[in-house]
Image (cartoon, rainbow, N blue to C red):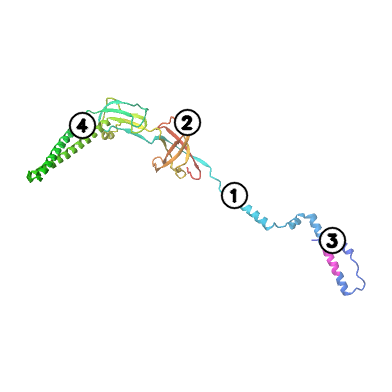
Amino acid sequence: MINEHDRKFAETLKSLALEPPSQPSGHKTKRTRFIFLALFLVLLGLAATVTVRAFRPDILDRWATVPAPPREAEAAASKATAEKTAESKPSPMPAKEVAGSGYVIALQAVPVFSWYEGRITSVEVDVGQRVRKGDVLVMLDDVSARFALEKAQAERVSAGLTLDSRSIELDQSTALLRRAEGLAMKQVVSRQELEDAVTARDKAANAVAQARQQLAKADLEIRVAEERVDALIVKAPFSGTITQLNARAGGTVLSRLDSVRENESLLTLTDTNNLVIDADVAETNLAALRAGLHGKAVLDAFPDQPFTIEILRLGPVVSTEKGTISLRLSLIDPPKDVRPNMAARIQIPVQTGDARQ
């Protein structure tokens, strides 16, 4: 639509037009008209440009926008893709802690029994005492064991004397055989006498062999009797601490088989230097737990002394009654006075994406 300004501008152009000559030629008239028409269109375009710039400059700005070069466009697209990927990449799962409770356990806690029955003559240790391997714990007395040792020793002496006697007889029969063989060569003795000498020598050699066997048997019986007498002195099988003491001087004990059946041990020896924690945690945390994970533990006896723990193994079964799984944990730099059966509370950091409550 032509506004008032355009209309006035057109009238001005019209007033400036020159009158054609009175009698122009046809070709010249057409050319003159074409020139005036072109000039009119140019002026009209300039007027339109001025009008648009005055009233709508944003249109010219859009026309003047030049597309970015291909390399800059690709860089912009790559940057946008990277930003989108970074936004879509999941952030690390925050950590949480699996909590549980349990007790300090000694890996080596052994009840000590007597191999043979007897009477307790003395108790050499007390509860809480530290002992080394081979130290005397309890001394017993058994008259029958000592008599058995004395009897074995006497039989050993008798077997030795018998062997000596049989050895002398063998030497004599051997000498007679040699003499008979010499006389037989001179045809002084008959062949029968020579054969009798050989038979006597063989019998003497057999008697010596039997005597040696009896001596070996006597030695074996002595070792058995000594082992039983030595067993009357109960010694520590390994280094540890006396954690329970049932033996009393003057009392009697049963043989090992009967004592085990009746659960009547002399004492309990515990290696307090090799302790672990057995703790229970909810089975829903099983997927997040594995051997090697570290955590923290605190003992009820030392609430202000937390220490590091490490999972050694996970229990092979889950408790159907409690819905928990047991963990065996090693103690790293625990308090100095930690003892078996102390209550402990544990916390093990895991990823929330793995642990389920």
Amino acid marked by disc 4: Gln
Foreground: disc 3 or disc 1: 1
Based on the displayed image, in which of its 4 quarters is residue 117 positioned? Answer: top left
Pick whichever of labels 3 and 4 is earlier in the sequence. Answer: 3
Tag 1: amino acid:
Ala
Q: How many residues crowd mark 1 within 10 Å: few (<14), some (14–19), many (20+)?
A: few
Mark sitting earlier along the chain (2/3) = 3
- Left/right placement of residue 291 relative to residue 142 reads right
Residue under label 2, please give it. Answer: 303
Disc 4 target residue: 153
Question: Are the residues flagged by discs 3 and 4 in contact, CB closer than 8 Å?
Answer: no
Image height check: is 80 above or below 18? above
Alpha carbon of mark 4 to alpha carbon of mark 2: how far? 63 Å
**Are discs 2 and 3 less than 8 Å apart at CB?**
no
Query: Alpha carbon of mark 2 to alpha carbon of mark 1: how far?
Result: 45 Å
Where's the N terminus, which quadrant?
A: bottom right
Q: Is residue 40 magenta?
A: yes
* Structural crowding at the residue carrying mark 3, measured as other residues with C-alpha within 10 Å and reported as few (<14), some (14–19) or many (≥20): few
Q: Which residue is mark 1?
A: 86
Q: Amino acid at mark 3?
A: Arg
Residue type at the position of mark 2: Pro
Labelled disc at residue 7: 3
